[in-house]
Image (cartoon, rainbow, N blue to C red):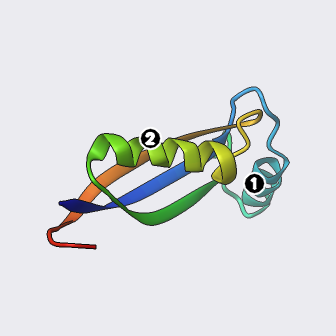
């Protein structure tokens, strides 16, 4: 039996890393009169579907994917939500 999961992945800069894009957006917001915005941090949002024999294996695969290609572990953190969407039976 194999299960399809949907992963919602959030990649953000580590708190110690400067965020020039966030600073630029914050500056633009202030120019538009949004003076109550104290800080802006820019990140990435990725959705993907993954098929796995179980949730633990799916999470191990997602960790590897995030660490190897979706994030730069030196300057970024990641987290994800994993949702089971379909269980498949039969021969693949």
Q: Earlier in the sequence, mark 1 or mark 2?
A: 1
Q: Nearer the viewer, mark 1 or mark 2?
A: 2
Judging from the image, what secondary structure is the residue with disc 2 in? helix
- Residue 30: mark in rendering: 1
Instruction: Pick whichever, 43 or 55, lies toward us.
Output: 55
Please tell me which residue is depicted at 62% across the width and 56% down the height of the picture.
44
Q: Which x, y percent locates residue 6?
A: 35, 62
Q: CA distance from mark 1 to mark 2?
A: 42 Å
Is 83 on the left-hand or right-hand side of 42? left
Please tell me which residue is depicted at 26% across the width and 48% down the height of the picture.
54
Q: Which x, y percent locates residue 30?
A: 75, 54
Q: Is residue 48 above or below residue 65?
A: below
The image quadrant that residue 72 belongs to is top right
Q: Which x, y percent locates residue 22?
A: 75, 50
Q: Is residue 82 above or below residue 5?
A: above
- Residue 78: mark in rendering: none
Q: Which residue is mark 2?
A: 60
Quadrant holding the C terminus? bottom left
Outermost residue on the front side: it is 91
Q: Which x, y percent locates residue 3?
A: 24, 60
């Amino acid at each position: 039996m194999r299960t399809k999961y949907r992963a919602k992945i959030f990649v953000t800069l580590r708190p110690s890393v400067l965020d020039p894009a966030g600073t630029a957006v914050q500056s633009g917001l202030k120019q538009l009169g949004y003076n109550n915005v104290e800080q802006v941090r820019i990140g990435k949002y990725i959705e993907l579907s993954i098929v796995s024999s179980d949730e633990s294996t799916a999470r191990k695969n997602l960790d590897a994917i995030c660490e190897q290609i979706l994030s730069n572990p030196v300057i970024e953190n990641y987290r994800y939500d994993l949702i089971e969407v379909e269980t498949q039976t039969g021969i693949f």
